[in-house]
Amino acid sequence: MVEKELIRTFFEAVNIPVCLFSGTDLLEKASHPTQDFNLPLILFAGIEKPLPPAFYGFTPEFLYFGGVCIPGTDEVLFLGPVLRFPCSMRQARQICSRLGRPAASGTQIQEYLNYTGGRQVSSILSGIRLFCRLIRIPDPEEITAVSFRWEIPYPIKAYPSVNTPPEEAVNLEHLLMSSLRFGNTRDLKEIIAKYFSSSSYQPAAIPSAHRKYILGALVRFTHETIEAGVNADTATGMMYGYIDQIMNSDTSSDISDVFFRMLTDFTQEVAKLRDLPSGSPVVKYIHDYIYNHLDEKLSPHFFAEKLNMNCSYLCTFFKKETGMTIIHYVQSEKIKAARQLLTVSDLSLVEISEFLAFSSQSYFGKVFKKYTGMTPEEYRASSGTAKVPQPV
C-alpha cells in the first residue's frame, strides 16, 4: 500500500487533491480543508472501467482529473479535480446539481475548486509522472484519455424539491437547454430521471395557460435545434407534429409526457450531428484527440507526426473521408466547446479564447462568428433567456 505520508507530501508539493483507492474503496485522501461533498469519489466512480495503467480526462464542466494504477495491486492513485480558471458560481451550481446538492452549496464547491488555482491537463500529466518516480515505478509510456459520465455511487436526496426555489429552477432550465443545444442525450436522460421521475402526475384537466407554456417551449426547442445545425425543414416538421399532440392532450399527465418526448426527440436530432463522419480509425483518432485536447494548438502537421503519416496525404485522406479539412474540423469542435462555455460559465472572452488555444481574442471572435453567425458577446447575451415551463 502507498504510504499515507507520501500522499500527504505529494499533495503539499503539487497542490492538487489526491486520493488512494483500493477497488472502489477510498483508503486515503489529501485535500484542502474545505467541503468537497465527496467530489473526488464521485468523479472516480464515473470513469469508464477497466482503467488503463495511467489515465486522464475531464467532465462536461471542464473539471480535469487523472490517475495511475499501482502495479501488482488493485490500488489507484487519483488526482483532481482541478479547473484551469477560477470557478464561477454558475459552474459551481451546475456541479452541485450533478452531485444532487442544492444550489446553496455552490459556495463550498467554489471555495474547494479555487484552492488549487489555475491548472490544466498538463498539470495532471506532470503529477502522474512525478508520483510514479516517487514510488519508483516506470514512467507510463502513454497516459490514456478516458471517458467519463456522472455516476452517484450512493443514494442522494433529490433536488430540487416540489417547492423549487426560483434560482434552482433557472439552473435546472439551464441544464435542460444545454443538453439540447449540444445533443447530450445521456445527460438529458440523467436530468429527467433525477429531477422528474418521482413526480406524481394526476389525470387532471390541463390549465389553458400551461398548454400555452408547452407550445412556447416547443417553439424554443425548434429554434435551438435549427441553431445547432439541424435542417430547418426537419425541425419544423417535428414542431408541427408536436403541435397536434399538445392540442390533443386531455390531461396534465398526457401533456407532461409530450413535453419530455419532444425535448428528447429534438436533443436526439442534434446528437445525430455529432456522429463521426467516417468509420476510419484515423478519423476516430483525430476526433478523440481533439475532444480531449481542446486546450492545445492543433494542426495538420501535428496529427501527421502523431500518426507517422505524410501531411499532404493525411489532409487529402481526411477531406475525402469527412468532407472537411482538418483545420475546419478542429475549429468546429473548439467552437462547440466555446458555445458551451459561454452558456454555462462566467468565464471572460479572453479566458475562453486562451483556454481553447486561440492565438488572440479577436481571432477567436472572428472564427466564432464564422461558424455561428454571431459574435461571442451576442451569443452569450442571447442564450438561456427564455423560460422552460415545469411539467405539472
Image (cartoon, grey):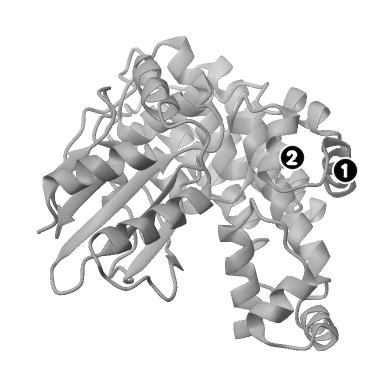
Q: Quadrant of residue 109?
A: top left
Q: Is residue 336 left or right of residue 195?
A: right
Distance between mark 2 and mark 1 Cα atoms: 9 Å
Residue shown at 27% from the left, 22% from the top: 34
Task: Judge whether 366 appears above or below 290 on screen.
Answer: above
Tell me where residue 382 appears, x and y as whole percent. Answer: 76, 26
Position of the N terminus by quadrant: bottom left
Q: Are marks 2 and 1 in contact (CB under 8 Å)?
A: yes
Residue underneath mark 2: 353
Q: How many marks?
A: 2
Residue 390 seen from this side: no
Task: Judge whether 70 appears above or below 30 on screen.
Answer: below
Q: Mark 2: which secondary structure?
A: helix
Q: Which mark is residue 108?
A: none
Label 2 crowd bin: few (<14), some (14–19), many (20+), radius 10 Å = many
Q: Is residue 251 left or right of residue 173?
A: left
Tell me where residue 64 appears, x and y as whole percent. Answer: 45, 46
Q: Amino acid at mark 2?
A: Ser
Label 1 crowd bin: few (<14), some (14–19), many (20+), radius 10 Å = few
Q: Quadrant of residue 102?
A: top left
Q: Mark 1: which secondary structure?
A: helix
Residue underneath mark 1: 363
Residue shown at 69% from the left, 49% from the top: 336
Task: Judge whether 75 appears above or below 36 on screen.
Answer: below
Q: Amino acid at mark 1?
A: Tyr
Residue shown at 69% from the left, 47% from the top: 356
Which of the two discs, 2 and 1, labels the residue nearer the N terminus? 2
Q: Is residue 88 left or right of residue 144?
A: right
